[in-house]
């Protein structure tokens, strides 16, 4: 699978995960990334990391998720160490955004740097069931459950961050600026 194209307004199915999804255990285990060469200075491609995305919680997740689907998480999604393999694994399976009750500042920052929006929306786990079709509008600050016709609001992403996400993240934007 590969990265879903960025869009300010996107639609996809929901995959539900609980509270306290740790970057080094639940999202992608540190033992796995270490075995793949993390720490040796070599960059692990998203396509490789994607094979291990969320397998500690749902072993078949990388096979079941479709490009454009969303991860919906509870409180503290992405907590733990400041490792960025987790957001790369999520992008690698084609998930264009994570929608959660709350997250960790390090995870949000790393995700933006790699081009993955993290949408914090209190009440999302009560509004969404697995398989529901969601529409996320980063510019308007709205998550709509198209299956139930309910919606929740969040602080819209600022234009500067939307531009960074639109280039594939801060790292991608900086590479383009250095070349240009």
Image (tube, rainbow, N blue to C red):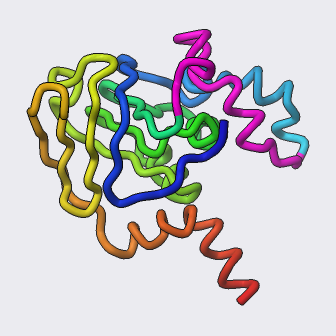
- Secondary structure mainly formed by the magenta segment: loop
- Judging depth in this view, the residue of 51 and 43 nearest the camera is 51
> Left or right of 83: which side holds 13?
left
Name the residue at 27% across, 24% down. 132
Residue positioned 16% across, 21% down in the render: 126
| Residue at 40% from the left image edge and 34% from the top image edge | 70
Residue extent of the magenta highlight: 41-66
- Dividing the picture into quadrants, the one containing residue 150 is top left
In this rendering, the answer to whether 23 lies above or below 175 is above
| Left or right for 64, reference 46 | left
Q: Quadrant of residue 122?
A: top left
| Number of numbered discs visible in the structure rendering | 0
Taking depth in this image into account, of 133 and 113 the one nearest to the observer is 133
Q: Is residue 119 visible?
A: yes
In this rendering, would 164 be left or right of 34?
A: left
- Give how far across and how far down residue 61 sits, in percent: 56, 17
Q: Is residue 143 left or right of residue 5?
A: left
- Quadrant holding the C terminus: bottom right
Residue 49 painted magenta: yes
Q: Nearer the viewer, residue 43 or 8?
A: 8
The part of the image, by quadrant, that contains residue 45 is: top right
The percent coordinates of residue 44 (x first, y second) are: 80, 42
Is 78 located above or below residue 141 in the figure? Answer: above
């Amino acid at each position: 699978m590969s990265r879903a194209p960025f869009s300010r307004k996107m639609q996809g199915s929901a995959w539900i995960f609980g509270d306290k999804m740790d970057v080094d255990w639940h999202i992608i285990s540190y033992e796995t990334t270490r075995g793949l060469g993390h720490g040796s200075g070599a960059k692990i491609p998203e396509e490789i990391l994607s094979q291990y995305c969320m397998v500690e919680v749902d072993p078949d997740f990388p096979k079941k998720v479709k490009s454009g689907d969303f991860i919906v998480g509870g409180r503290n999604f992405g907590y733990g160490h400041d490792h960025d393999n987790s957001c790369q694994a999520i992008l690698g399976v084609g998930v264009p955004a994570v929608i959660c009750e709350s997250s960790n500042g390090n995870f949000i920052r790393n995700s933006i740097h790699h081009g993955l929006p993290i949408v914090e929306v209190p009440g999302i786990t009560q509004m969404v069931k697995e398989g529901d079709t969601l529409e996320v509008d980063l510019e308007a600050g709205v998550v709509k459950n198209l299956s139930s016709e309910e919606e929740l609001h969040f602080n819209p992403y600022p234009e500067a961050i939307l531009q960074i996400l639109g280039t594939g993240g801060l790292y991608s934007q900086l590479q383009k600026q250095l070349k240009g």
